[in-house]
Image: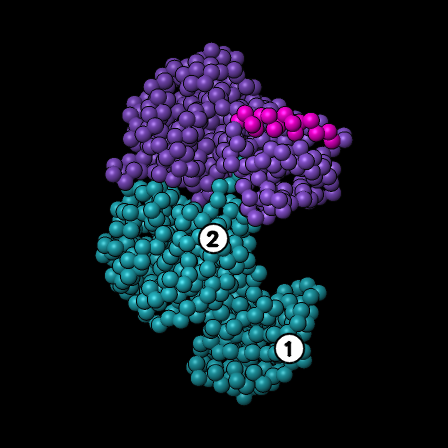
Chain colours: A purple, B cyan
Amino acid sequence: MLSLDQIKNLSRQSLSKIILLVIDGLGGLPRPDTGKTELETARTPNLDLLASDGICGMIDPVSPGITPGSAPGHLALFGYDPLKFIVGRGILEALGIDFDVKHGDVAARGNFCTIDQNGLVIDRRAGRISNEKNAELCKILGNIVLSDVELHVIPVKEHRFAVIFRGDKLSGDVSDSDPQQVGLAPQAVISLSPAAETVARLANEFISSAKVMLSDHHPANMVLLRGFSQYPNLPTMAEVYKLNAAAIAAYPMYRGLAKLAGMSILDTGTSIEDEFDTLVRNYADYDFFFIHVKKTDSAGEDGDFDTKVKIIEEVDALLPKIIRLEADVLVVSGDHSTPALLKGHSWHPVPTIIRSKWCRPDRVREFSETDCSSGALGRFPGVSVMTLAMANALKLAKYGA
Amino acid sequence: MLSLDQIKNLSRQSLSKIILLVIDGLGGLPRPDTGKTELETARTPNLDLLASDGICGMIDPVSPGITPGSAPGHLALFGYDPLKFIVGRGILEALGIDFDVKHGDVAARGNFCTIDQNGLVIDRRAGRISNEKNAELCKILGNIVLSDVELHVIPVKEHRFAVIFRGDKLSGDVSDSDPQQVGLAPQAVISLSPAAETVARLANEFISSAKVMLSDHHPANMVLLRGFSQYPNLPTMAEVYKLNAAAIAAYPMYRGLAKLAGMSILDTGTSIEDEFDTLVRNYADYDFFFIHVKKTDSAGEDGDFDTKVKIIEEVDALLPKIIRLEADVLVVSGDHSTPALLKGHSWHPVPTIIRSKWCRPDRVREFSETDCSSGALGRFPGVSVMTLAMANALKLAKYGA
């Protein structure tokens, strides 16, 4: 595999355009009664046509057998080795609420929790308090004053919030306060390297103050923090690929992941059609588009096979909007599989199409897990998708003399 | 590829069970008159059923084009990168005779050889003396006294023996005494790093004493030592995979390799049926089983195509004993190919089945080299077999946020 520096040396700016359509959690597992996966059950004439015209295969976003989180799955598709570039839990939580994370910020995922009179955690989620209560408590905690840093406490959902420490020379290399099980006391945050002593001290101050301020708010009478992390240092897609890249995603977390890669974020609506229309409207202004369809993954997580089928069919029905743009390269893939049968992300490889004037079409005629498994792209690492897209866009120079 | 440390962070102990059936030297080459390999010639209804229910592919135990020895082939299947974890010749020889190698021991492979009156080697194998003579001579050499170390000289077969130096702070980083060709004198053993000076000195003392003691035992009037090595430091499967792993192998070397990975060794008989019965008997007590079938490899090494076919058929006929256990994950593979036509290990990839409730079955209906080559697992590194088995057993957490 070439390094990003090597790819940077080969990449060439040009007029050709690439569209990367990511159908989140695309891959599935066959329902026992039909033997067909969600994608195989869906009627998808347009995807099948793309599969016929293009070259198909199966990607392992991280590595065979490894179930990717959303961040590694997307980083791989954007061409960044997900074993090298790590997005911490805190950062992802902040990205997920559209918080404008800056380089140097330290973010942590917070839980409101319940402690008993001995200070032991008895409910790690404080009975899943309402979003309203969460917002009220975050506002209270936002009044905590810490020397030398700016503090942001932002509600997420139910018991979840994000806390961001903004200041100079901070490091997120500290331990969690969350003991991860009930019956234990919250742990002191400990610095794991000398540079992180400030954050450890500030986090412990924050937790102590929170404990006092929340004492009257049972069941949300304490906080647990975990996943302290900083914005990872990714070279942008402009630097590596010389692309003027734009992202279209209805959900904040995916806009956040695109921002990590330096993409411009385009305003869009909440439906798949809104997203596709946003692409059409902005098509002239960029040469790379990442479009994200979320609801396939949500349906998979819910174990709702039929809804996942319907959303795939909705994507297929809207696909002519994208096909008519006649992009030089059109990629259809997913960041991981989310089989309805497993109700969660899984390790199964993800069916993938690359369609361009210069791809070498194979015998695949249907966009399905089974057919893509015998496609000419074979089974390959997700991080190669961008290199293949760039090659098919004739944006990569020859390697070596 | 994830490091063992990364896998350790993802692995979860659970009730699910994994069986890894290793058919040694499984892969073959087609006999010109039929165009079918050993596996394709054998009638294997049970393996074919597993292939239909499961997902299939071809593994490269070490790397494409590389012919694996038994140690790298097995380490790969146990999930250890065979390019990183090296088992030396001396250690393998000691494991092959069930010698209880301890951490810190230095083991070497020995040959009895013939030298002429000028001290030059004229037969590196001393005319392949009998096992009885070998045992007699090893007993004599075992009387050599070396300061500070305990010496073990153990007969293997014909001219072969193992010598083990047991003591404190030894290192096996020394050169061979075996010149590897006739017409040369045995070489002095030289330390290749300061820590190995003791072993170099002791090995040379041992060789000098042996020369004196063997002078009346022509043709076995001298020894040659090579492959000085120590027990490699493998994290155990309990540490990496949180598995309580057991090994069932009729041949000592494979028990030794399993011991390297920290598996418990189960007493078994000499036949394949004995091994399978041992599995059934102990099924409740472990969550990972490695079962090793040796005779396919021996037949391949002998160039005996028909015997290899028969042994594969014997495995197939006994397979219902294993299938009936309904393990959560059943893997069938080999440590390398041993085509009867080549009479030895070869680089050809090895057909592999992974069968679980959560695998995504492909179109493979027959367990054969040709069919597995179009299986949905594709062609993949042997070291990924364990990761895939763990994933299919739902024993791996999600990677990344």
Which SS type dominates the magenta stretch?
Answer: helix
Q: Which of the 4 quarters of the picture holds residue A218?
A: top right
Seen as rendered, the residue at the extreme right is A147
Q: Position of residue B132 (x, y in %)?
A: 44, 84
CB contact under 8 Å: marks 1 and 2:
no
Which numbered dot is residue A251?
none
A5 vs A15: above or below: below
Q: Give the structural element (helix, strand or loop) at label 1.
A: loop
Q: Are marks 1 and 2 on the same chain?
A: yes
Which residue position is annotated with label 1? Answer: B149
- Front-most of B312 and B78? B78
Q: Which of the 4 quarters of the picture holds residue B189?
A: bottom right
> Which dot, 1 or 2, sits closer to the camera?
2
Q: Which of the 4 quarters of the picture holds residue A319?
A: top left
Q: Position of residue B74 (x, y in %)?
A: 45, 59
- Front-most of B118 and A386? A386
Give whichever of discs 1 and 2 has the lower sequence position. Answer: 2
Which numbered dot is residue B13?
2
